[in-house]
Amino acid sequence: MDDAQAMLLSGNAKAGMDHVILGMREIKNRYPATEWRDFAQTTFLGHPVTQLIHQCPFTYHSFSKPRGYAGDAELLDFIYGFKQPSQNLATLGREILEHRVNSPISSSVKARKDVLARTIDDVASEATHPTRILSIACGHLREAKESVAVQEGSIGQLVAFDQDPLSLEVIDREFDNGSIQTIRGSVTTLVRQKQSFENLDLVYAAGLYDYLSQPFATRLTKIMFDMLRPGGKLLVANFIPDHREVGYMETFMQWQLIYRTESQLADVAKEISALEIANKRTFFEDNGNIAFLELVKA
């Protein structure tokens, strides 16, 4: 941390950040999970380098959690370029921000958005009826801005479902599109079947599974699958373990995720009978940090 602090203070933000991120990953791999958390909180957050790193508005937004939870839609908007820093932001903060939003993990988040947009377009182009789509934990629904089908109004209905009213307000404000409907609700209400949807052509969740336990994710996957009409598609995404930025995220950003291997992600479909599934596959976005599970209903 002393070396990283010296690099940052000398104006070499890229080298300093790379030193922090790679060094923290190496140290994390040496410790059991509980010991790592204690060590990171006392040793890293207690170091003066934290004050320098938290000049980055992206990092500090995650750390401070202004909406009360990690990974909110406003944080992702830094990555997507919809949220810009203050013009008064100091040079170091701006350089760290540029490093973070162009990092491999941020590139994966952008790629995830592109996968969702392409999936919406594929489903819309193949449908012979008005397409019904549900996005669970939709955030600001940024993939809809990349979707040709949404922009051209060639889908029947896209329901944007989220527990955060501020996210839904952004969607209502930015999308002048009668096919997009916002509904406030939590995934718990879906699992308890107090809210439900049916006859969907596509149901998807982008960042949600990064916060769900395996039993909860497994149950939700079954419920989501049951919402589909025959031929409908389910798509969920999850960060894989041991990516290069995990130590930085868990410490300086206080952004804790539940990671899954490709096989662990595939296993969330275990409550669904194989006879109900016409096609099942897992794949990665181009950077290899996020895995996807796709199911097509028979």
Image (spheres, rainbow, N blue to C red):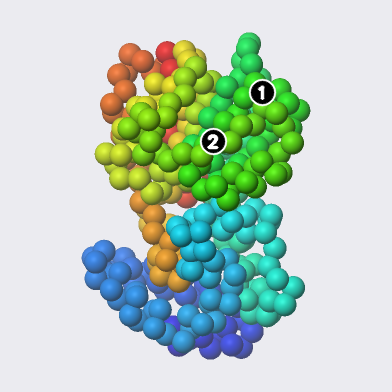
Q: Quadrant of residue 171?
A: top right
- Asked if residue 14 shows in the view, the reply is no
Q: Quadrant of residue 25?
A: bottom left
Q: Which residue is mark 2?
A: 183
For the N terminus, the image quarter is: bottom left
**In this rendering, would 55 be left or right of 269?**
right
For the C terminus, the image quarter is: top left
Number of marks in the rendered image: 2
Q: Position of residue 168 (x, y in %)?
A: 59, 44
Element class at badge 1: loop
Element class at badge 2: strand
Q: Which residue does the image show at 57% across and 31% down from the upper left?
A: 159
Above or below, 222 against 50 in this view is: above
Callout 2, which amino acid?
A: Ile
- Asked if residue 127 shows in the view, the reply is yes
Q: Which residue does the image show at 40% across and 39% down from the upper left?
A: 187
Q: Quadrant of residue 75?
A: bottom right
Callout 1, which amino acid?
A: Ile
Q: Are marks 1 and 2 in contact (CB under 8 Å)?
A: no
Q: Position of residue 172 (x, y in %)?
A: 66, 41
Q: Which residue does the image show at 37% across and 30% down from the upper left?
A: 194
Q: Which residue does the image show at 58% across and 48% down from the upper left?
A: 167
Outermost residue, top side? 128
As measured in the structure, the alpha-carbon distance from the residue carrying label 1 to the one carrying label 2 is: 18 Å
* Of residues 121 and 226, the one drawn nearer to the viewer in this rendering: 226
> Which mark is in front, 1 or 2?
2
Above or below, 293 against 22 in this view is: above
Task: Specify which label sits upstream in the sequence, 1 or 2.
Answer: 1
Q: Which residue is mark 1?
A: 155
Q: Position of residue 250 (x, y in %)?
A: 40, 65
